[in-house]
Image (spheres, grey):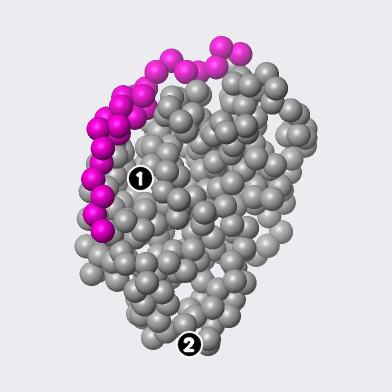
Amino acid sequence: MRRYIPILFLIILATFTPSNTQAADNFVISCEGGAILVDFQTSKVLFEQDADKRWPPASITKMMTAVVALEEGKLSDEIRFTKKATDQSGSKVGIKEGLRIRLYPLIEAMLIKSGNDAAMAIAEHVGGSEEGFVRMMNSKAKAIGMLNTNFVNPTGLPDDNQYSTARDLGRLAVYAMERKEFKKIVAQQSLQFVSPDGSEELTLFSTNKLLGRHPLVDGIKTGFTNKSKYCLVASAAFRDYRLIAVVLGAERNGVWLETARLLDYGFRKHDPLYPLYREFDSLVIEDTDNQTPED
């Protein structure tokens, strides 16, 4: 089902344009690829640092893959896993070739587990081919004002021609989180995944390690490749006030701390009643799992 971009997004585009939002108190985020903090309700940029620097988005790409699939696909459709889907490298859901999975739980698996096989299966089904789906991704990007972004695949696996910016990914996050299906999916810490024929029964855990650890975070998406380093787009809400934070190119465990610091900075600036839930400087989430080289 096609949805058209309302006039509201012309206003959102205007509010996302570069401005002098660097903090007067010299607040700095430790990352190479840029960072931005956005008021979800107004799309006002509260903080930016190299926000227009082009950077490989890695699996944050899957935010756009999900948006296009939710808007253009039929969620009850059963999708057959092709050899091309199962042959994807990096992080996988692990579905065998030939099995059929409904679109909606496959979108869940893609966003929660960051499965490249799931992303490719979705793209081939919804777009008719990977190339057709990528055209849809780029069309949607332009429609919502992502003017410094280009997609060449639905997974985020490395390609020199696939890039975005912290500002553009902030725009995408605001757009995506206005969709209740997307918002519900990215808040899940885990998923019981069962194929229609019962041959696949898996428990998938979110790659977003702030879920369940940061008291306010309820999404959204991680990304990692050797080139992009560690990237995170996060959503958090306190007293009905929601912030979107984007941190690109951080260190392995530092991405969690830097994102938490950025959110903490925004809430403290906005609300004098914002409580100190914890000392964020001591928030260290060790990646002890055997993460695949590229997710």
Residue 199 on image: x %, y %: 53, 87
Picture residue at 69% right of the left edge, 43% below the top: 214
Q: Is residue 265 left or right of residue 224?
A: right
Residue 133 on image: x %, y %: 26, 61
Q: Is residue 70 left or right of residue 25?
A: left
Is residue 240 in sight in this rendering? yes
Q: Is residue 119 above or below residue 57?
A: below
Q: Main secondary structure of the magenta part?
A: loop
Picture residue at 73% right of the left edge, 43% below the top: 284
Q: Is residue 105 magenta?
A: no
The image quadrant of residue 292 is bottom right
Residue 111 on image: x %, y %: 49, 59
Q: Secondary structure at mark 1?
A: loop
**Residue 16 vs residue 237, the one in the foreground:** 237
The residue pinned by badge 2 equals: 197
Q: Secondary structure at mark 2?
A: loop
Q: Is residue 87 above or below residue 275?
A: below
Which residues are drawn in magenta?
1-25
The residue pinned by badge 1 equals: 163
The kind of residue tagged 1 is Tyr
Picture residue at 49% right of the left edge, 50% below the top: 183
Is residue 251 in sight in this rendering? no
Do tag 1 and tag 2 residues touch (Cβ < 8 Å)? no
The kind of residue tagged 2 is Asp
Q: Is residue 33 left or right of residue 14?
A: right
In this view, the mark in front (1 or 2): 2
Residue 203 on image: x %, y %: 62, 72
